[in-house]
Image: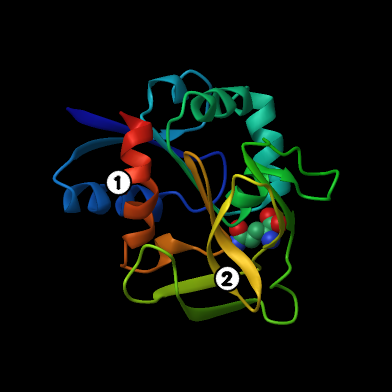
Amino acid sequence: MTLTAGVVAVQGDVSEHADAIRRAAAAHDEEVTVHEIRESGIVPGCDLLLLPGGESTTISRLLREEGIDDEIRQHVADGKPLLATCAGLIVSSRDAKDDRVDTLGVLDVSVDRNAFGRQKDSFEAPLSVDGLDEPFPAVFIRAPAIDEVGEDVTVLAEWDGRPVAVRDGPVVGTAFHPELTPDVRIHRLAFFAPEAEQLAR
Ligand code: GLN
């Protein structure tokens, strides 16, 4: 069976994620077709979804305008996997503490936008992530931090004492950009780990 993946492409880094999904699928001997999502009607046909980084205020506005927001909520309610990175994590959260971001509420965390930004706009750190044997080269770009996690949320990684990767059922959120390194282990964790497989099939 060929999997159908959707990369939300209203704004932000799309092609790197599409490439990472293809390589993660290949590592698991899965065929995958990748769609870029700019309008409603495509998400319902996707087995797995990716919500990339970019600018959370813009992404959330465009998702609402295009009617993609409710489709993503339904995707998660159906138990299908979603990987949300950086601005995608902010948009997916329960609360971004910023009226300009209309959050999806599919990931039970609150976030602090730009927590790792401003003073140090971008850095790379070797991150220990639950479920990975070796540290992951995590690229942080004006990254958010997670400041509150709900009861059912598992913290997969912390940096500087704050959660930066979490799993909440079918949703994995990262404050960093896993698509900006050749390493696809975060995509594999989000979509092909036993926890995700159970949910996807
Ligand atoms: N801090 C940005 C925002 O609030 C996200 C940055 C990113 O995705 N690299 O949208």
Question: In the drawing, does residue 126 fall left or right of residue 30?
Answer: right
Q: Residue 150 at what x, y percent from top left?
A: 68, 47
**CA distance for labels 2 and 1:** 22 Å
Q: Is residue 134 above or below residue 50?
A: below
**In the structure shown, which secondary structural element does the residue marked by tag 1 occupy?**
helix
Q: Is residue 144 left or right of residue 50?
A: right
Residue under pointer 2: 158
In this rendering, the answer to whether 128 lies above or below 69 is below
Q: Please tell me which residue lies in front, 13 or 199.
A: 199
Image quadrant, ligand 1: bottom right
> Which circle marks residue 129 in the picture?
none
In this rendering, would 113 be left or right of 34?
right
Number of numbered markers: 2
Task: Report the residue at 65% width, 47% height from top.
Answer: 151
Look at label 1 and name its amino acid: Phe
Q: For mark 1, does the 10 Å Cα neighbourhood hold few (<14), some (14 to 19), or many (20 or more) residues?
A: many
Q: Residue furthest front?
A: 151
Residue 156 or residue 67, whichever sits in front:
156
* Disc 2 residue lies near ligand 1 with CB under 8 A: no
Q: Earlier in the sequence, mark 2 or mark 1?
A: 2
Name the spot of residue 122 as percent of width and height, x first.
Answer: 60, 77
Residue furthest out toward the right: 99
The vertical placement of 179 against 140, above or below, is above
State which quarter of the image contains the C terminus.
top left
Q: Callout 2, which amino acid?
A: Glu
User: Residue 86 in the image: x percent, y percent?
Assistant: 59, 57
Name the residue tied to disc 1: 192
Give the structural element (helix, strand or loop) at label 2: strand
Which residue occupies 38% across, 21% down? 45
Residue at horizontal 32 percent and vertical 60 percent from the top:
184
Place of residue 5 in the rendered image (x, y in percent of width and height, measured from the top left): 35, 35
